[in-house]
Amino acid sequence: MAKIVNQGETIAAIATAIVPQQGSIGIVRLSGNQSLTIAKTLFDPPGKQLWETHRILYGYIRHPQTQQVIDEALLLLMLAPRSYTREDVVEFHCHGGMIPVQQVLKLCLELGAKLAQPGEFTLRAFLNGRIDLTQAESIAEIVGARSPQASQMALAGLQGKLANTIHQLRHACLDILAEIEARIDFEEDLPPLDKNSIIEGLKRILAEVEEVLATSDQGELLRSGIKVAIVGRPNVGKSSLLNAWSRCDRAIVTDLPGTTRDVVESQLVVGGIPVQVLDTAGIRETADTVEKIGVERSRHAARHADLILLTVDAQAGWTAEDEEIYQQVNHRPLILVINKTDLGKAELVEFPSRIKQIVQTIAAKNQGIHALEKAILASVKTQKIKAENLNLAINQRQSAALTRAKLALEQVQETIADQLPLDFWTIDLREAIQALGEITGEEVTESVLDRIFSRFCIGK
């Protein structure tokens, strides 16, 4: 994308999700030198409203040739440089639905605007110095956040908390590099290099890099969440467990074995972590063609889940069918859920000693759900994740760059310990500086920009 972005062009796109018969407002956004000209061509504000920056005008969008009214709308003006892209930005706030915004977008394109590529508005904000690369990525994470904690983490990134830390680390490396290069170029005019000071400085930088790197797993967990599969033989209460957990009737519950024929999904949040819960069909041998397909899908869901909730019936105990299912899923992290404990004693259920996490539930009566959530959090070791500690949760791209910086800094330390000449010190120090610069975008390639912004939605 970066290769073909022409910042001289005016771009336009629908900036809101459009669903037929839903949504009160639909927004068409323009950015570029012709934005205001296109707006004045299409928008007819009654009275003496002022076309000034950061004003909202009321009026009608008209076809430029026929003067037919397309929609009654609001027009928001944000002129350069006080806009998201630091270019002239105009937004038509139309009625919701598909037709008004599509008609307005079509007219904007006919008047010379170009359809924006995914993420092009944010890419222009980055290229024009409005935001850095970590803030651009945070914008995408806010849009895609699946829990309040993930949203707060992304907002901290948008506010520059990660960028500030990376800038400080990079500047500290640059200061050390300057000290070393000054001795290389002007050795006779300067006092000897304080080797111990350089070593201590590198240690401090490396410690901070490692501290930021340690947030990678937490950040990924809050962004992506975990997939949990409820598995077991028919009629042990899997669907009742899903309904109790999600607090709604997501799955059909009957006394007939094989009621659930397909995988039923529910999106939940547990301790700030997004959880995709899969209620699977009861796993058993069956001659029913449809049920057989459901059983195979259940096995597939179990194979790809991050965590298995193996559910058994307290009244029936651990059966041969339970053992067979356990052998199929015991390669995954697993919690044993002993359900229907009001009908049978959980302590009488004999199960493999390898299973360490056990939760008792009465799903039909909504009992045991809190204990189940605590067990899930314990299984992914996230009890210490708190929203206030998420200011520096990095993503995979940032983690890869920081890892390169860490290895380069460690190599500098080895070079010094081996008493190699100063020129050798600068090689890996420059590598660390470049890697840190890639995180914020101070040093970045077009291919990296393509990879980042192609994941954005059009209109953002």
Image (cartoon, rainbow, N blue to C red):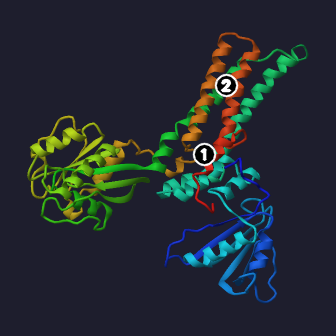
Q: Nearer the viewer, mark 1 or mark 2?
A: 1
Taking the image as shown, residue 146 lies to the left or right of residue 28, namely: left
Residue 145 location in percent, x, y?
Answer: 51, 56
Taking the image as shown, residue 46 lies to the left or right of residue 252, namely: right
Q: Amino acid at mark 2?
A: Leu
- Label 1 crowd (10 A; few <14 / some 14-19 / many >=20): few
Vertical comparison of 139 with 59: above or below = above
Q: Amino acid at mark 1?
A: Arg
Residue 320 location in percent, x, y?
Answer: 10, 43
In which quadrant will I find the C terminus? bottom right
Mark 1–mark 2 Cα distance, whole angstroms, equals: 32 Å
Vertical comparison of 38 with 80: above or below = below
Residue that sits furthest to the bottom in the current view:
47
Q: Nearer the viewer, residue 210 or 37?
A: 37
- Label 2 crowd (10 A; few <14 / some 14-19 / many >=20): many
Q: Are marks 1 and 2 in contact (CB under 8 Å)?
A: no
Taking the image as shown, residue 305 lies to the left or right of residue 47, namely: left
Vertical comparison of 252 with 409: above or below = below
Q: Secondary structure at mark 1?
A: helix
What residue does disc 2 label?
202
Q: Nearer the viewer, residue 317 or 401?
A: 401
The image's mark for residue 451 is 1
- Residue 63 image-quadrant placement: bottom right
